[in-house]
């Protein structure tokens, strides 16, 4: 869909001024849509444009993505920046798979900034993909594919040797439960390349993380680091397939300076947080329900 094909109306939400973009026919009743948006019975994703940013929502309490209109390729939300800390361990991935598209911030960053990388994004909800023009996502080409499919089914059919897998898989109820099963993380381990990295965005109630973190730790033999994202209330999990994984933090700190200069993200800070979290056993503490 193009920008002009969406149904628009003024935002009905207090404290969220702007224009809403909806996937509705042009003769839709504004009053009925407003009521469904306000009582959260509206069951499709929608976009809010406040003149500076565009935001993807599943409901007004669940903002999924943000894009600054003047800088559409930047990673606006902090947790998306920290997910890219995987480049410390896999700086030149050949194949990168993202499960969960959202507004496509990570897809755009990887496509623009990693010219040697084949980027594939898998999204179950076609209504999310339909907003790709609003979020300035490039068209598919030889390096980029956006696929409407079930993430687990797609991965099962994929060839092995994926260097980085990023999970950012949420619907209006939260993290997609089908992508939190033990066999799914075992499948991820199987499909990753020898030194491949899994990155998972953990959002929602911290008490709900434990089971998922534990299942990843089981699949990856405890080679897991989890850092907090206080700005967003999230955590980001990194899991490493390499059985000899033993991070050299001083070397990574030097590498982080180069990556910061190249990408404009605070990689030195990411290294500091990862080293501290690794030594403090944050992943294990979250697994057993401790608030970290």
Image (tube, rainbow, N blue to C red):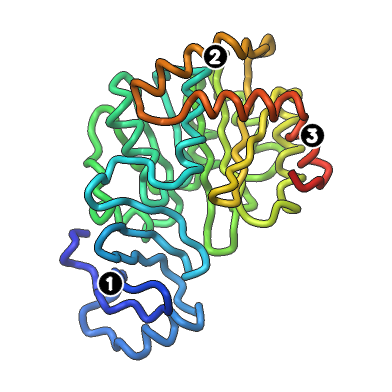
Q: Secondary structure at mark 3?
A: helix
| Relative to 209, 164 lies left or right | left
Q: Nearer the viewer, residue 182 or 275?
A: 275
Disc 1 on helix, strand or loop?
strand
Q: Give the farthest residue toward the left.
A: 4
- Residue pointed to by mark 2: 252
Q: Residue at position x 55%, y 20% from top?
A: 196
Q: Residue furthest right?
A: 288
Instruction: Identify the mark nearer the N-term, 1 or 3.
Output: 1
Residue 10 vertical placement versus 270 (above, below): below
The picture quadrant where one finds residue 210 is top right
Residue carrying label 3: 284
Q: Earlier in the sequence, mark 2 or mark 3?
A: 2
Q: Which dot marks residue 191? A: none
Q: Quadrant of residue 33?
A: bottom left
- Residue holding disc 1: 19
- Nearest to viewer (mark 2 / mark 3): 2
Whole-number angstrom distance, CA of label 2 to CA of label 3: 23 Å
Q: Residues within 10 Å of mark 3 (few under 14, many from 20)?
A: some
Q: Position of residue 130 (x, y in %)?
A: 30, 57
- Answer few, some or many: residues within 10 Å of disc 2's Cα (few below 14, many 20 plus, some between 14 and 19): some
At horizontal 35% and vertical 21% (from top left) the residue drawn is 261
Task: Give the percent coordinates (x, y) of residue 197.
Answer: 56, 24
Q: CA distance from mark 1 to mark 2?
A: 44 Å
Task: State the SS at label 2.
Answer: helix
Horizontal and vertical percent for residue 80? 46, 41
Residue 226 position by quadrant: top right
Of label 1 and label 2, which has the lower sequence position?
1
Image quarter hosting the C terminus: top right
Q: Residue at x 59, y 11 (%)?
A: 250
């Amino acid at each position: 869909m193009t920008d002009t094909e969406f149904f628009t109306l003024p935002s009905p939400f207090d404290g969220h001024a702007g224009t809403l973009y909806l996937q509705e026919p042009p003769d839709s009743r504004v009053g009925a849509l407003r009521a469904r948006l306000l009582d959260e019975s509206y069951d499709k994703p929608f976009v809010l444009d406040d003149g500076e940013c565009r935001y993807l929502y599943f409901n007004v309490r669940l903002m999924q993505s943000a894009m600054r209109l003047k800088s559409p390729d930047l990673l606006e939300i902090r947790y998306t920046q920290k997910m890219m800390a995987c480049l410390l361990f896999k700086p030149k991935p050949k194949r990168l798979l993202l499960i969960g598209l959202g507004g496509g911030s990570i897809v755009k960053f990887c496509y623009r900034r990693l010219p040697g990388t084949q980027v594939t994004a898998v999204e179950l909800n076609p209504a999310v993909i339909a907003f790709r023009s609003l979020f300035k996502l490039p068209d598919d080409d030889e390096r980029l594919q956006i696929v409407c499919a079930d993430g687990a089914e797609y991965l099962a059919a994929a060839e092995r040797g994926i260097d980085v897998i990023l999970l950012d898989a949420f619907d209006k109820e939260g993290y997609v439960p089908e992508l939190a099963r033990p066999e799914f993380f075992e499948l991820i381990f199987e499909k990753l390349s020898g030194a491949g990295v899994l990155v998972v965005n953990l959002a929602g109630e911290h008490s709900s993380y434990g089971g998922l973190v534990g299942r990843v730790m089981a699949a990856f033999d405890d080679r897991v680091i989890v850092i907090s994202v206080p700005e967003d209330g999230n955590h980001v999990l990194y899991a490493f397939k390499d059985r000899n994984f033993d991070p050299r933090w001083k070397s990574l700190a030097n590498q982080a300076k180069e990556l910061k200069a190249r990408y404009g993200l605070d990689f030195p800070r990411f290294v500091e947080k990862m080293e501290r979290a690794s030594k403090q056993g944050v992943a294990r503490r979250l697994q057993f329900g401790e608030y970290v």
